[in-house]
Amino acid sequence: MSDMHDRELAGAFDGQAPKFEKAPVQSDPAALERLTREAGFPSGSRLLDAGCGPGLVAEAFLRAGCRVVGADLSAVMIEKARARCAYAGEAATFIQASIHSAEVAELGPFDGAYSRYVLHHVLDPRAFLARQVELVRPGGRIILCDHLASPDPAAARRHQELEVARDRTHTRNLSGGELVDLFAGAGLEDVRYCEEPFELDFDEWFDRGTPGESKASVREVMLAGVDARGFRVAPGQSPSIRIECVRAIVSGRRA
Ligand SMILES: C[S@@+](CC[C@H](N)C(=O)[O-])C[C@H]1O[C@@H](n2cnc3c(N)ncnc32)[C@H](O)[C@@H]1O
């Protein structure tokens, strides 16, 4: 099950990589700066980038003086990460592998770990976090950034249906409360949480996905109105559709 999901993810992100690295939400310098600031890793820290994609986040941590080992399932994402971060020389290593693989464990232990926009693609969020806890030294911090789901189950379900229609590899966004519980449940200490709003343009967002349904049918649902915390259609935008989203940054320290 997990191997098949990993293969689907690798294929989907091989296809998405060229548009993904140019997407405003992924490349936004202010959001990257916020993430590195919230993480607060001391310069020289050696970090695991879990699901590194095209190396946008790795580049931000490298520029903050850290060393990065990035792992990703997608060969195209890894090529892009290597090209983007080549200037950093030995401070940056990228490996095409699951974070659950032995190859990644052999590169540890790490001073800290981070992931951005990966959790909503995994089948087992607890296993995804537990793996990072396992690979980080005692005292190391693990930080995660992801889009939020509404705490209202019905609204979260409607949001999830649209996400899956636009990207078949999407599993589930967690609510803010679920994220905090995930970190506390993994035994992490000093759990910190903050959130910030961001916006998506429907066409830009849909066109870089791996859809399971037609764009026209998803557009129709969006225009009828979607009002979930974390995924809300801004009023009065037809024919363009602006989606008001919320992302969270959550972190905790390994005891
Ligand atoms: C939405 S992209 C985010 C990329 C990058 N973190 C960023 O924010 O720019 C999600 C990435 O996670 C990777 N991924 C998902 N599960 C993974 C796993 N178990 N091990 C390694 N990479 C994984 C996918 O291949 C994909 O490239």
Image: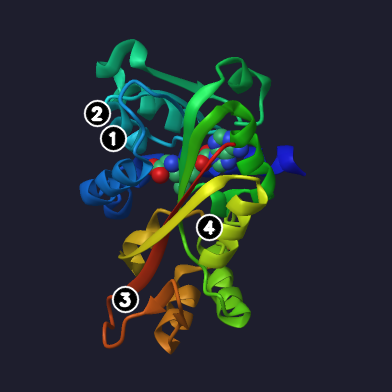
**Between marks 3 and 2, how big is the CA–CA gap?**
35 Å
Q: Residue at x 61, y 35 (%)?
A: 133
- Do labels 4 and 3 touch, CB within 8 Å? no
Q: Earlier in the sequence, mark 1 or mark 4?
A: 1
**Between marks 1 and 4, how big is the CA–CA gap?**
26 Å
* Front residue of 38 and 101: 38
Q: Earlier in the sequence, mark 1 or mark 3?
A: 1
Figure quadrant of the C terminus:
top right
Residue indicated by mark 3: 241
Single out the mark in the foreground, 1 or 4.
Answer: 1
Going by the numbered disc 3, the residue's amino acid type is Ile
Residue indicated by mark 1: 60
Quick check: 174 left or right of 15? right
Q: How dense is the environment of label 2, judged by Cα within 10 Å: few (below 14), some, or many (20 and up)? A: some
Residue indicated by mark 4: 167
Question: Could you say which disc has been placed on residue 63 in the image?
Answer: 2
Q: Residue at x 57, y 69 (%)?
A: 160
Q: Earlier in the sequence, mark 4 or mark 2?
A: 2
Give coordinates of residue 56: x percent, y percent.
32, 37
What residue occupies the far right of the structure in this picture?
Answer: 1
Q: Residue at x 35, y 72 (%)?
A: 243
Going by the numbered disc 2, the residue's amino acid type is Arg
Single out the mark in the foreground, 4 or 2.
Answer: 2
Q: How dense is the environment of label 1, judged by Cα within 10 Å: few (below 14), some, or many (20 and up)? A: some
Figure quadrant of the N terminus:
top right
Q: Note whether residue 165 is visible.
A: no
**Between marks 1 and 2, how big is the CA–CA gap?**
5 Å
Give coordinates of residue 138: x percent, y percent.
57, 29
Q: Secondary structure at mark 2?
A: helix
Colouring method of the image: rainbow
Q: Note whether residue 66 is visible.
A: yes
